[in-house]
Image: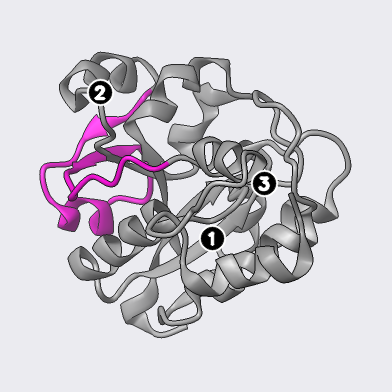
């Protein structure tokens, strides 16, 4: 990996299925931080959510199709290779062990912060990674700052601070919002409604051909 790629985003989620909101965020990340790599980490067994409807293999296949036009993106299946619940702590710990010189930046939507205190070993995350918190509909970034500080993260005003420090900083990023959820897409599929403009056409074709839902 070149010196320009010594900072890497970690973007996790169930991706059940991947939708245009996910892709919109990744495009913005690449615009704001063009030299950073992005590692997409599909969750195998969500600890705080209902089990996924689509299998892991289907979700990864849809991810590959939905993200194939984006460069410097790695889809990392490691959570499928572990038994039990998929904990972000374990993935970050293993990535730090494998790549001790690379700075890891975990990307979270502001809505995910509502449940972060329930995460496994959440108090240890500030010793493994930085956070980039992205705005989400109906959630104010300013309301999250005290919780982030209680978890051991200090505010980084600029992205340069994330590159200089090894871990323990957070940066709030405002992007154009796309109010799309995988839950809405699955509900529309169950009711035989169109998911056009919510999901990439290649993913729609995959769903039509393979029936993961």
Choose the circle earlier in sequence order: 2 or 1. Answer: 1
Residue 138 versus residue 170 in the image, above or below: above
Q: Which residue is mark 3?
A: 43
Residue 79 versus residue 112 in the image, above or below: below
Q: CA distance from mark 2 to mark 1?
A: 25 Å
Label 2: how many Cα within 10 Å (few below 14, some 14–19, many 20+): few
User: Tag on residue 155?
Assistant: none
Q: Position of residue 179 (x, y in %)?
A: 32, 40
Q: Which residue is mark 1?
A: 40
Q: Which residue is mark 2?
A: 138
Q: CA distance from mark 3 to mark 1?
A: 10 Å
Extent of the magenta region = 152-180
Label 1: how many Cα within 10 Å (few below 14, some 14–19, many 20+): many
Query: Which residue is drawn at the image coordinates 73% and 40% (left, top)?
Result: 52
Residue 170 highlighted magenta (yes or no): yes
- Mark nearer the viewer, 2 or 3: 2
């Amino acid at each position: 990996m070149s010196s320009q790629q010594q900072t890497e985003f970690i973007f996790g989620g169930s991706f059940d299925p991947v939708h245009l909101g996910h892709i919109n965020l990744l495009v913005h990340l690449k615009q704001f931080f063009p030299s950073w790599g992005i590692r997409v980490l599909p969750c195998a067994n969500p600890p705080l959510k209902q089990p996924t409807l689509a299998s892991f293999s289907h979700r990864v296949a849809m991810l590959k199709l939905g993200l194939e036009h984006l460069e410097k993106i790695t889809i990392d299946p490691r959570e499928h290779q572990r038994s039990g619940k998929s904990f972000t702590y374990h993935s970050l710990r293993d990535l730090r062990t494998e790549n001790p010189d690379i700075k890891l930046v975990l990307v979270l939507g502001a809505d995910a912060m509502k449940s972060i205190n329930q995460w496994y070993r959440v108090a240890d995350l500030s010793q493994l990674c930085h956070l980039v918190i992205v705005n989400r509909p109906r959630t104010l970034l300013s309301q999250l700052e005290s919780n982030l500080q209680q978890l051991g993260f200090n505010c980084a005003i600029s992205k340069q601070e994330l590159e200089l420090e090894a871990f323990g900083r957070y940066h709030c990023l405002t992007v154009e919002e796309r109010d799309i959820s995988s839950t809405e897409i699955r509900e529309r599929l169950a009711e035989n409604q169109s998911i056009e403009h919510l999901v990439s056409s290649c993913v729609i074709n995959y769903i039509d051909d393979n029936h993961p839902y």
